[in-house]
Amino acid sequence: MIFTEENYNENLTKKVLPFIRLNLEEGYVTGADGTRVHYGYVSTPAPKAAIVISHGFTECMPKYYEMIYYFYNAGYSVYMVEHRGHGYSDRRVKDMSMVTVDDFSDYVSDLDIFIREVVAKKEAFRPLYLFGHSMGGAIAAMYLEKHPDVFKKAVLSSPMIEMLYGDYSNFVVESLFFISKILRWKDKYMPGQGQYTDEYDFESSCALSKARYDYMYGCKVSDEHYRTNGGTYAWGRAGRKASKFIKANASAIKIPVLLCQAGRDTLVSNEAQEEFISKLENGTLKKYPEAKHEIFNASDETLKTYYADVLDFWD
């Protein structure tokens, strides 16, 4: 049963958080360059499969506790990393608000190490499924293209196949990234990006569920590790490069993929998602017209349909 807006706080307090405290195992793997990447998992003795979650830009593990709870209760073990520069994983900068990376292949490499060193060892020969949201959807797509034989199924939720840049034209964006590279702007915030503040702004957020927004707002206020807030020029250039790679190599993905699209998305391109899924051998597109970017933080009606679609696809 999916929690409604009305009973979310009660269920979070009495069910989800106690479940996480009792069952979540945590640890670290070390990336190829020495970066320590934080992970967590909940495992059941005889799961249908193991699901690996790849989270979005500026996100962290607590944002997915509700989803982990649903997947576990549906019969799956669930594994998740906090991508480098997020949550309790290592950062290369002192600014806890800043998200920076030179290449998305670093994220993909970290994920692969986690899968090989933790997930595969614990799950033996059980099937593995991949879930990726937004930036994590881009990482997931790249992973599937580079490692086509690891996962049996994948769900990409509002995946960042291509970013949107508001009113900036493609020419302006390309010019800005070109200039930033010439000027060696690396760990420097892009326009519109900046340090975390505790400003409360549900109305312009990516969520339609106020209860879920409030929960994550509280997580950020109480723990500086969850205050990632803005991307650098290095991250922006890396994201643009990743988009080109993903679109060029889509046909390498042979497994069944469910792409969940938010009708009111203002952060990533729905057109690019549709182009991407059309190139897949076994791709399915599901649209949620009323949802903002975070479909898993939508209205009660959308959430019920969304989780039914995802769990039906897993089964």
Image (cartoon, rainbow, N blue to C red):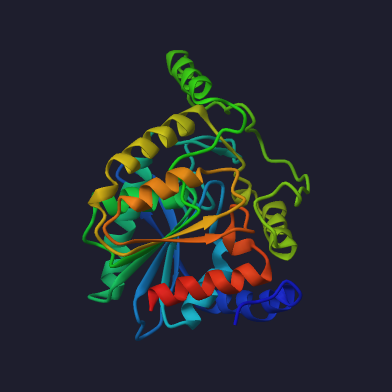
Visible residue check, residue 138: no
Query: Who's the residue at 52% across and 53% down the image?
Result: 88
- The residue sitting at the bottom extreme is 46
Residue 55 position within the rendered picture, expressed as x and y whole percent measured from the top left: 49, 55
Number of numbered labels in the structure image:
0
The image shows residue 49, relative to residue 289, as above or below, that is below
Q: Position of residue 64 (x, y in %)?
A: 55, 64
Residue under the image location 60 percent in, 58 percent down: 289
Instruction: Please give left or right for residue 95 compared with residue 112 in the image.
Output: right
User: Looking at the image, is 165 positioned above or below residue 37?
Assistant: above
Q: Is residue 274 visible?
A: yes
Residue 63 is left or right of residue 104, and the answer is right
Quadrant where the image shows the N terminus: bottom right
Q: What is the x, y in percent for residue 19?
A: 57, 79
Quadrant housing the C terminus: bottom left
Indicate the position of residue 89 as horizontal and vertical percent values. 48, 50
Residue 40 shown left or right of residue 298 in the figure: left
Q: Residue at x 30, y 54 (%)?
A: 280
Q: Nearer the viewer, residue 241 or 95?
A: 241
Please, is residue 21 above or below residue 53 in the view?
A: below
Residue at position x 54%, y 37% from top? 164
Q: Determine whether, in the image, residue 117 is placed left or right of residue 292.
A: left
